[in-house]
Image (tube, helix red, strand yellow):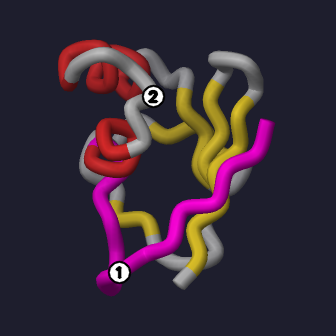
Amino acid sequence: MNQTFTLTSEYIPLNKLLKFLDIWENGWAIKSMITGWLIFVNEKQEFRIRNKLVAGDVVTYPDGDVTITISN
């Protein structure tokens, strides 16, 4: 499944994007997924909770192999 998220500012922190898209129930679950190296940004494992995502970035996570493309 693919989703597209449209930025309304210069960037969005990774944890805020996942919370906004209602990927997991709460911030604790999101933090655990990121620090557990289960999130990929532009095909690289990401462990920075507040990584600034900009237009063109692609976020992938294992829950159903969902890909989120950031656009502006």
Does the magenta-highlighted stretch encompass residue 14? Answer: yes
Mark drawn on residue 50: none
Horizontal and vertical percent for residue 36? 43, 16
Circle 1 sits on which residue?
A: 8
Q: Residue at x 67, y 20 (%)?
A: 62
Horizontal and vertical percent for residue 5? 54, 62
Q: Residue at x 60, y 48 (%)?
A: 59
- What is the magenta range? 1-15
Q: Is residue 62 left or right of residue 70?
A: right
Q: Are marks 1 and 2 in contact (CB under 8 Å)?
A: no
In front here: 24 or 50?
24
In front here: 47 or 17?
17
Callout 2 secondary element: loop
Q: From mark 1 to mark 2, how far is it between C-alphas?
A: 19 Å
> What crowding class fits label 2: few (fewer than 14 Cα within 10 Å), some (14-19), or many (20 or more)?
some
Q: What is the quadrant of the N terminus in the image?
A: top right
